[in-house]
Image (cartoon, coloured by chain):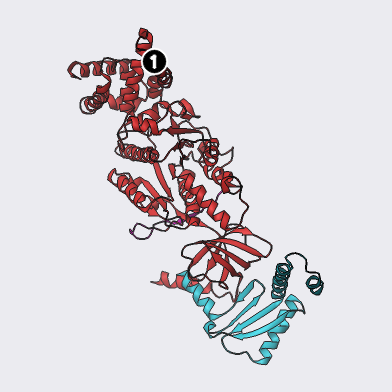
Chain colours: A red, B cyan
Amino acid sequence: MSAFLQELEASIAGLQTDTTRTNVGTVREVGDGVAKIEGLSDVMLNEMLEFPGGLYGLALNLEETEVGAILLGDFTEVTEGTEVKTTGRVLSVPVGKGLLGRVVNALGQPIDGKGPVRSEETYPVEKIAPGIIKRQSVSVPVQTGILSVDAMIPIGRGQRELIIGDRATGKSTVAIDTIISQAQLNQQAEEGRNKHHKPLYCIYVAVGQKNMSVARTIDILDKAGALPYTVVVSAPASESATNQYLAPYAGTAMGEWFMNNGMDALIVYDDLTKHAAAYRQVSLVLKRPSGREAYPGDVFYLHSRLLERSARLSEKEGGGSLTGLPLIETQAGDVSAYIPTNVISITDGQIYLETDLFYQGVRPAISVGISVSRVGSAAQIKAIKQVAGSTKLDLAQFRDLQAFAQFGSDVDPGTRKKLDRGQRIVELFKQGQHDPMPVEIEVVILFAMQKGYFDDVPVDKVRDCQGKLREFFQTRQSDLLQRVVDKRAIDKELEEGLHAAIKEFKTFYRP
Amino acid sequence: MVQTVINEKPRHYVDVLKDYQRLVRLEIEKRHAVVESATPLNRALGDQIVSGLRARYGDDITTEFRTNPELIGGLRIKIGNNVFDGSVRNRINRLQEKF
């Protein structure tokens, strides 16, 4: 009780300083979430402004006699003549582990009805990305649990990998499956079954989506047990454009906390096309000059400064990382539009999803030819490197030959073999949604494929065979799987073990 | 000068004049002090405040006195964009924020 009394005395004593000096302005014009304010001579760029009734704004345009500010929240009470105060603070959001499992808005306020967010620290929303000295190269994989991605387009911790494709091609699914996969790996590590895995926390930023889609995503994450490792930042289509513009930065600030504290985090921006559109709206209302497709001149910087904040810090800085998975929606497969080209050039590679493949039943509809990861095999464990090395080439050759072989039935045996192998790889890479594959199973399947164990299985039975093989290993060969997890490379002894196990499986498998 | 513009009527001259008016208004506001108090101030205190402001900001400061019961007590002085708030209302608000 006396401690409380002392605290009270101290806080009252703090108020004894007679007068406070504040810098104020008056609203001259307001509309569409943007206010023009006269006065505010001491305001700084990106400073928070206080409006009556607990509403805050952000000063974005500083002009000779007035300030253009965006309003963060319900601006129906703001009228001409309203007095506005500077606060001397930049916009910050709560950060920390208390946010895991929560759904928050662009300002970090909870919107999931689970009470206040427990967080002691805040981070500024806008922050300069770590410099060259602070970084190290990417070498630790993010296991997405999607066989085709892990085998051919590996993503490393600290990398920025773009997921691009038309509407309804499964972009969000790839990202959500990755989050689910991390949750499974984190659980595995917590139970002591995977000593190599460093927990990877996820942040899912939903920009300009339907509330229904966000609710469905949260439900999927919850059912898969991934929510306790995930922060959801939601700025749905019903929110103002200003909140949609801020949400990715707020999410990144939350991710940076994990990175700066030596932990690893993954952030999904779903999606940056809508983010650019929201920023375009804000810019046009602020009367900034517009350029191509009416986007403002700094729309490139908008995304580059956001994605540059994904990094892998050096051991001296704690060795944390932030991996970025931005999503971009294209129109009719046009990757040469303004925003897609911008983001392609910023990121370290892209996963391209194709509508045609999607409707052919190849799901995830990843187009191997133009999907790349500039980090490459540095972000794969040795076992995957050993078994997946030539897969991408095999598949590329298959695509070439497939077009060629359509014209005639007579092909030489070498070509026939490549075609057969290719068809089976395509089948193997088909995967159900929200069912990420553990890395040890990926190794087994790729191993079986590389050694030709699927060659005598009819193409339409490959998936069935793959499923049964997975089941067989998980139920009867769990020791072998554990050895793959522990060793992370296939040595002579393990190779023999895998051969023997797959042969045993083949003796009783009937397609 | 204003008369010259009105006589010559260059393009958009009304807008030009409106803009000019706004700039002049802002310039005047910068040198204008508004002193608010909960109850009307007595003459001696008012003079003291005016001389204090003149000492600090120069002799061309214009002063206006207003009463605002919402302040409860103390003074609130606004000069241009700056507000010096020593009112009881402001202290209560700050105390509220602290909790």
Residue position marked by numbered label 1 in the rendering:
A407
Can you give x and y, in whole percent of width and height, for residue A42 in the image?
65, 64
Is the residue marked by circle 1 packed among few (<14), some (14-19), or many (20+) residues within 10 Å?
few
Can you give x and y, in whole percent of width and height, for residue A235 in the image?
43, 53
Splitting the image into 4 quarters, where does residue A145 fall?
top left
Magenta stretch, main secondary structure class: loop
- Given the image, on which type of amino acid does mark 1 rest? Phe
Q: Is residue B53 above or below residue A36?
A: below
Q: Is label 1 in a helix, a strand or a loop?
A: loop
In the foreground, A442 or A162 = A162
In the foreground, A388 or A455 = A455
Q: Quadrant of the N terminus of chain A?
A: bottom left
Q: Which residues are magenta?
A: A110-129
**Residue that sits furthest to the top in the current view:** A412
In the foreground, A47 or A494 = A47
Can you give x and y, in whole percent of width and height, for residue A80 in the image?
56, 72
Q: Is residue A417 above or below residue A77?
A: above
Q: Quadrant of the C terminus of chain A?
A: top left
- Report whether B87 appears left or right of A393: right
At 39% from the left edge and 34% from the top edge, which residue is drawn? Answer: A355
Q: Check if residue A168 falls in the magenta segment.
A: no
- Report whether B29 appears left or right of A495: right
Report if residue A363 is visible in the image.
Answer: no
At 40% from the left edge and 44% from the top edge, which residue is drawn? Answer: A202
In the foreground, A283 or A308 = A283
At 47% from the left edge and 33% from the top edge, which residue is drawn? Answer: A350
